[in-house]
Amino acid sequence: MARYRVGLETRERILAATRRLLSESGVEGVTLKSIIDQANVGAGSFYNLFGSKEEAIFEVVHEAIDAVDPDPAGQGTDSLEDLVDAFVTFMTDAAPIARIYLQLSVGRGLTDRAIATRVLRSHATRKERFADAWQRYDPNLTEDEAHIKAETLLAALTGLGLNALLDPTFDMRTHAMALIPREVTTA
Amino acid sequence: MARYRVGLETRERILAATRRLLSESGVEGVTLKSIIDQANVGAGSFYNLFGSKEEAIFEVVHEAIDAVDPDPAGQGTDSLEDLVDAFVTFMTDAAPIARIYLQLSVGRGLTDRAIATRVLRSHATRKERFADAWQRYDPNLTEDEAHIKAETLLAALTGLGLNALLDPTFDMRTHAMALIPREVTTA
DNA sequence: CTCAATATTGAGCGTACACTCAATATTGGA
DNA sequence: TCCAATATTGAGTGTACGCTCAATATTGAG
């Protein structure tokens, strides 16, 4: 829709405003008025660039779901520690996006199948990554064992992340690192 | 407010309707109309019994937060397995309430300090219970170690519970039980 | 510089929402 | 049985919402 430079800039201002509001007020708390006020834009301008309020929210929301993936560039070489570290960093440093991700996957995912499916898909990818890392960590593990361990580790990380977002004084990194076994059972 | 039998019954019908709608549509998806339609009650009747829509929702919501506490009767005698088992049962058997609890603690807790505080308080109580059980399980643990282990276990359970609600085919019990160490290090 | 394409504005529209109230019916203690 | 207290109804109110549109301004390729 946007072809001129000013249009693209306005689009970015709107998305930035939406991002900020989503993390502060939650998906249902964001109104069109709050977005266009925050972005300093008229209602008509908004609808020149987006088809609906939902469209802008979905754009930010999908960006949040994708952002959880720790180090998308790394391909099968990350250690367990790297992956856990990336997850913790995402939760603590990218708190606004992490908030959106959790609100979404839980708040909406539980009542909206489309969102649930999308969340589960990105979750499955992440699980594979963790399972691979776990097998590299301990080659004795069967594939099944590695998957169960990966699933459990990810669940724990999600739970700890939730804690961290609810309670800013919570030391997520220490707890998260305690999840990784200290000695490797070498064959 | 309600003094006569019919009034008390209507109150119960309204709360039942609210409970069901909350688990299906989420906190923000519940409208006054949906409640009074589901409860078969006029709007005026609703306001004769509740001060506001929020009041009815809060009543159900607090009931949900309290319900997570596994076996509130047991006092310092439950084993780790008992506690984990109770948590899993809550998540799988009481799915509607569990849905409300998670939606709330995450969806709302992240943007509403009052809810966050309440959730964290009930979480702290639960953590104590798990830490005690862990020290009974392995007397070698220091109090600090037990607390960290309790926190991590609870986080993992929460994460697994989320999985279970998002994906009905997920076998939560197996994953949850795998979190409990199989051998006790006796002194 | 010209001008068609794009961008911006804000008053206003329809709708759905939470909530009120005056009229009427029901309850249950005395 | 009587009747004050309580319960029920639903049309109606004000408000906030997402969104439209006609008028006007700005952009940038040729």
Image (spheres, coloured by chain):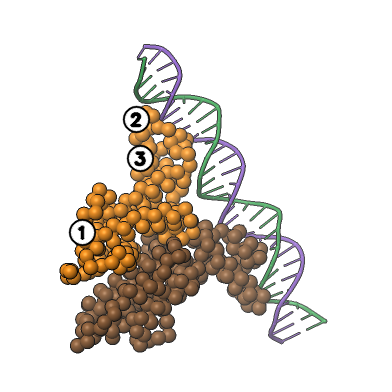
Chain colours: A orange, B brown, C purple, D green
The residue nearer to you, when weighing A44 against A164, is A164
Q: Are marks 2 and 1 on the same chain?
A: yes
Label 2 close to label 1 by CB (< 8 Å): no
Q: Residue at x 38, y 48 (%)?
A: A62
| Foreground disc of the pair 2, 1 | 1
Q: Position of residue A125 (x, y in %)?
A: 34, 55
Residue B99 is left or right of residue A86, and the answer is right
Say whether disc 3 or disc 1 marks the residue closer to the N-terminus. Answer: 3
Chain that bears disc 2: A
Position of the N terminus of chain A, as image quadrant, is: top left
Give me the C-alpha separation between circle 3 and circle 1. Answer: 38 Å
Give the numbered dot on residue A13: 3
**How many numbered dots are placed on residues in this image?**
3
Q: Secondary structure at mark 2?
A: helix
Measured Cα–Cα span from mark 3 to mark 2: 13 Å
Cα gap from disc 2 to disc 1, whole angstroms: 43 Å
Q: As shown in the figure, which amino acid type bears the numbered disc 3?
A: Arg
Tag 2 residue: A5
Of badges 3 and 1, the one in the foreground is 1
- What amino acid is found at the position of numbered circle 1 in the picture? Ser
> Which residue is rendered at x = 36% and y = 73% of the image?
B176
Residue located beneath label 1 in the image: A79
- Location of residue B71 in the rendering, given as x and y in whole percent from the top left corner: 42, 81
Chain bearing mark 3: A
Q: Helix or strand or loop: what does disc 1 sit on?
A: loop
- Of A67 and B171, the residue lying toward us: B171
**Above or below B138: residue B59:** above
Instruction: Residue type at mark 2: give it.
Output: Arg
Residue that appears at 40% across and 57% down = A120
Mark closer to the chain start, 2 or 1: 2
Identify the image quadrant of residue D7.
bottom right
Residue in front for this viewpoint, B47 or A117: A117
